[in-house]
Image (cartoon, rainbow, N blue to C red):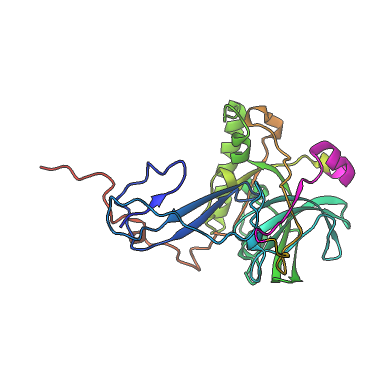
Amino acid sequence: FNIQRQGILSNLWPRFVTAPHLTIVSSLISPVYGRNIATTYCRMDSIDPDASPKPCAPVVEYMPLEDIEKPERYRPGGYHPISIGDRLSNRYTVVHKLGFGTYSTTWLAKDMNMDKYVAIKIAIAGTDMLESKILNTLALSEPSDEEQPGEALIPQVLDTFSIDGPNGRHQCLVTEPGMMTLAEAKDASYTRLFRMPVAKAIAAQVIQAVAFLHHRGVVHADLHPGNIMFRLPNSIDKLSPGELYQKYGQPNVSPFVRLDGKPLSDGVPTHGVMPIWLGKESELVALSEAKIFVTDFGESFLPSVTQRHSYASCMTSIYIVSKPEN
């Protein structure tokens, strides 16, 4: 048995992590809006620990595009095809893309009723949007609640609706858009550091947010720098789509092309859109901009309702370090 991780950490994975004839494919994507980092675990056809791993060969039908989701994900049960300029729920005009993940794409849209920008997360077809249920639960006030500063650090559900398309029915969640995640700000920086006052402000707000979640009986279950987002300044709502493009750039679109030269499959858009960059490098974030909110509640749960883990399930059955001999 032997699983080898392909990529930067391939030499760091222990050879004693074992499983017979196993193939696992995982995508690590900027959890909120999306910078795609694919990770593939490939199976060994031999149980010989000295045998070389055979690379996985996922079916690739389309020309790969950098920083754009795989066209293969646009299929029945997958993504909903969206184009810049689409009108959703007879209210929201799509002006750009914010990102993508395994289970959704997220778009920047102009709310024509409220004249402001919103983020619309569109789930893959046939899935229940658990995130909206958790957020709505958190929004319900309780008579016994004391004032919780962390409540303001949880995104508000502005709207929910569904879309019927060629790949099925998709649940949509509307929230405020963010500037960037902590992880994206660090990745964009050479130093990968925030100024000390900014770092302290971020840490204090994260503590307040988690305290509020736990006070309301909710476990986030996926809290990391990629799920903590800086707020956009309110001034962005004063920009028209044209002014937004002038400041942040026109949508960068690339055509989806099949490798076999055949026409696109049904439900696949003609073009992919690279996510917009609204952020800045971590060391350039001013203290006045260090206003965050916690995002991506897709893994969240209420322990009073759902038991996710037991103590035993969190224990490894493999010794990471050999036991000392007496």
Farthest residue toward the left? 326
Q: Indicate yes or no whether the magenta region holds residue 80.
A: no
Q: How far across and down, in percent of the image, does residue 8 sit?
A: 46, 41
Q: Nearer the viewer, residue 193 or 243?
A: 243
Is 54 rendered above or below residue 35?
below
Picture quarter containing residue 165? Answer: bottom right
Q: Is residue 326 visible?
A: yes
Farthest residue toward the front? 261
Q: Residue at x 72, y 41 (%)?
A: 277
Q: Nearer the viewer, residue 3 or 144?
A: 3
Is 68 rendered above or below residue 140?
above
Is 181 rendered above or below residue 80?
above
Q: Is residue 142 visible?
A: no
Picture quarter containing residue 101? Answer: bottom right
Q: Residue at x 82, y 66 (%)?
A: 89
Q: Residue at x 71, y 31 (%)?
A: 288
User: Which quadrant, please, contains the C terminus?
Assistant: top left
Q: Residue at x 72, y 47 (%)?
A: 274
Q: How far across and down, in percent of the image, does residue 239 sit?
A: 87, 42
Q: How far across and down, in percent of the image, does residue 233 sit?
A: 77, 39
Q: Seen in the image, is 321 located left or right of residue 64?
A: left
Is 146 rendered above or below residue 74?
above
Q: Nearer the viewer, residue 124 or 232?
A: 124
User: Which quadrant, please, contains the N terminus?
Assistant: bottom left
Q: Indicate yes or no whether the magenta region holds residue 242.
A: yes
Q: Seen in the image, is 322 located left or right of residue 36?
A: left
Q: Seen in the image, is 210 located left or right of residue 231?
A: left
Q: Which residues are magenta?
A: 237-260
Q: How far across and down, in percent of the image, does residue 24 sit?
A: 45, 59
Q: Seen in the image, is 130 located left or right of residue 161?
A: left
